[in-house]
Image (cartoon, rainbow, N blue to C red):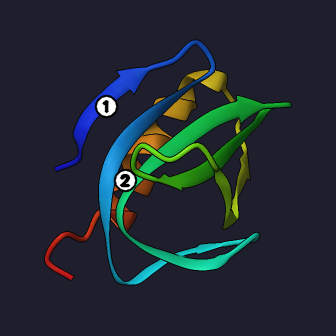
Amino acid sequence: MAEAAQNKSTGKSSDIVAGPGGVMTDEVGVVTGDLTLRTELAGGEAVLSVQYKDAEEWYAVTGGRSKLADPADLEAVHAIAVALLHRPEG
């Protein structure tokens, strides 16, 4: 599935490959190709952001915020986001 997932104190990140439909972002529209997806806990919400692999700029995933009943659910939200967005075969 996704490559090199790494734990962070406030979130998780995984390398993904977005398919032709890409990932819609608030700042720049659709991004495709080799990306890093990050899921962070902010104010009781899971917040998704994405960047081109090894780039510095992060972009908010459109619709990528959700209230969490329990902060421990962050890992499950990240796993679901990776499963939905990682489409190396298109």
Residue drawn at point x = 64 percent, y = 34 percent: 40
Q: Is residue 56 left or right of residue 88?
A: right
Residue placed most toward the observer, 66 or 47:
47
Q: How far apart, in angstroms, are the residues tagged by discs 2 and 1? A: 10 Å
Residue drawn at point x = 69 percent, y = 75 percent: 28
Whether label 2 touches label 1, CB < 8 Å:
yes
State the SS at label 2. Answer: helix
Residue drawn at point x = 36 percent, y = 40 percent: 14
The residue where tag 2 is placed is: 82
Mark 2 vs mark 1, foreground winner is 1
Q: Is residue 54 left or right of residue 61?
A: left
Identify whether 3 is placed above or below 34.
above
Q: Is residue 34 left or right of residue 37?
A: left
Residue 3, picture quadrant: top left
Amino acid identity at mark 1: Ala
* Residue farthest along the top direction in this orientation: 9
The residue where tag 1 is placed is: 5
